[in-house]
Image (tube, helix red, strand yellow):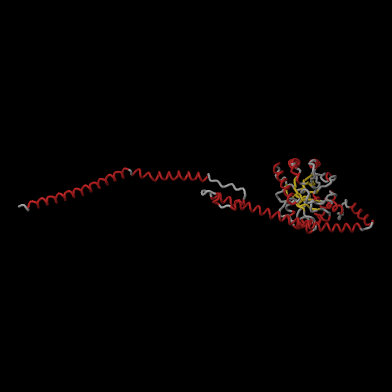
């Protein structure tokens, strides 16, 4: 009996333990379910809020992009004072990380363009210098020949001298051949000294009246007046030139079709040699003391080989020297000046294509700079009131150059 009682008590304890374990498991399951319910509740409640999140993010992104764009605008290219310095620098040395790529490309294109302009300018100056050397060498040869001729003349007897004087006297009359000894003397009286001031020859074309002549003389320094041949519009243009110590003839030649109102008896490319020769002969009769002539208009005429060849034949016959007004970049005048062993003289600038005080003065300054570089320059203007006003008011600009007549050019 004493052994059976303890067995019942042990069986009772085992049953209590099992019940307690089941209760714990149930509580855990209940807690999990409860937490899951709470999570579901909050998920459903915040569903609408979650939907709005992309819109808020998008708005925030746009705001940031706008701010970055404003910061980009504030990024400036560095100030470059020297192109050489710019080439030696690396981009990271002076650019921020955020800079406008298009601006960089624009700057590089500008730099290349500027370098090309500089290279073209250097090539142009070198070409001018080479041409000047050739011209001066040729002129020296001509002068040497003239010196020899002069020595031979000195050895001639009195009879030959009288004969020469007679020819010189008759040279003022119109003829097929005019003695050029007086012309040679005038050209050789000027000796160019490179140590002296650069020379500038200012030519005023289209002179036809006494009033224009007086205004030009009133400038107070040497100015080359180029007179249009007489017509019924300006009949006295030859007469008023006669008492000047130096003057030129402004020879009308065929212009492009865009030019309206050509002068009477303008030379055309289809004119025969006889027509051109007759016209040159008439100029010699009107202007017996003239040596130099330059073209009035003539962009079409001076481009034509056959026409310019005929013109130079006639000019040489009547002892004229031609100055190319360079109304066309395709002028062939230089070619025929060489062919007929005549000096090639060409203008450097037109000063009054734009009839504005500042524009005219700037062109005059350009001519002065050319004179300083190559020793001389030829500038062409017209007797407009504004042009003459600029020339009168710009005397101070001429302090570093010497105004001269065309026949005083260094290479003549």
Relative to the observer, which residue lies in front, 96 or 157?
Answer: 96
Relative to the observer, which residue lies in front, 85 or 225?
Answer: 85
On the rendered structure, is 81 left or right of 55? right
65 is higher (above) or lower (below) than 317: above
The picture places residue 375, in percent across and down from the top left corner, at: 76, 51
The picture places residue 278, in percent across and down from the top left corner, at: 82, 53
Q: How many discs mark residues in the rendered view?
A: 0
Quarter holding residue 155: bottom right
On the rendered structure, is 51 left or right of 115? left
Q: Is residue 60 visible?
A: yes
Relative to the observer, which residue lies in front, 122 or 95?
Answer: 95
Residue at the left extreme?
Answer: 1
Residue at the front extreme?
Answer: 2
Q: Is residue 205 visible?
A: no
On the rendered structure, is 8 left or right of 191? left
The picture places residue 260, in percent across and down from the top left corner, at: 72, 47
The picture places residue 291, in percent across and down from the top left corner, at: 82, 51
């Amino acid at each position: 009996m004493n052994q059976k009682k303890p067995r019942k008590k042990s069986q009772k304890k085992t049953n209590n333990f099992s019940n307690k374990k089941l209760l714990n498991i149930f509580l855990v399951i209940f807690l999990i379910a409860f937490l899951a319910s709470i999570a579901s509740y909050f998920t459903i409640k915040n569903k609408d809020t979650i939907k709005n999140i992309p819109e808020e993010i998008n708005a925030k992104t746009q705001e940031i992009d706008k701010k970055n764009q404003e910061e980009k605008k504030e990024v400036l290219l560095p100030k470059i004072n020297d192109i050489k310095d710019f080439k030696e620098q690396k981009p990271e040395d002076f650019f921020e990380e955020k800079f406008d790529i298009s601006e960089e490309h624009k700057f590089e294109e500008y730099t290349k363009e500027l370098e090309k302009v500089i290279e073209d300018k250097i090539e142009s100056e070198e070409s001018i210098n080479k041409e000047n050397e050739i011209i001066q060498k040729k002129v020296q040869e001509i002068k040497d020949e003239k010196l020899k001729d002069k020595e031979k003349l000195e050895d001639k007897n009195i009879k030959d001298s009288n004969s020469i004087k007679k020819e010189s006297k008759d040279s003022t009359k119109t003829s097929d051949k005019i003695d050029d000894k007086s012309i040679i003397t005038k050209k050789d009286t000027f000796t160019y000294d490179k140590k002296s001031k650069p020379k500038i020859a200012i030519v005023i074309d289209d002179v036809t009246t006494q009033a224009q002549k007086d205004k030009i003389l009133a400038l107070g320094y040497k100015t080359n007046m180029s007179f249009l041949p007489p017509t019924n519009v300006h009949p006295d243009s030859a007469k008023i030139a006669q008492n000047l110590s130096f003057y030129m003839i402004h020879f009308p030649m065929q212009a492009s079709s865009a030019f309206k109102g050509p002068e009477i008896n303008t030379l055309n490319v289809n004119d025969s040699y006889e027509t051109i020769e007759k016209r040159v002969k008439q100029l010699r009769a009107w202007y017996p003391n003239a040596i130099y002539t330059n073209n009035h208009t003539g962009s079409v005429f001076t481009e034509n080989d056959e026409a310019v060849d005929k013109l130079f034949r006639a000019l040489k016959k009547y002892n004229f020297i031609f100055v190319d007004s360079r109304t066309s970049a395709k002028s062939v005048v230089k070619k025929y000046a060489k062919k007929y062993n005549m000096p090639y003289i060409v203008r450097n600038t037109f000063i009054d294509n734009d009839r504005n005080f500042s524009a005219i003065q700037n062109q005059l300054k350009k001519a002065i700079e050319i004179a300083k570089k190559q020793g001389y320059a030829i500038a062409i203007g017209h007797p407009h009131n504004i042009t003459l006003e600029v020339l009168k008011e710009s005397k101070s600009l001429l302090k570093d150059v010497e105004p001269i007549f065309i026949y005083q050019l260094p290479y003549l």
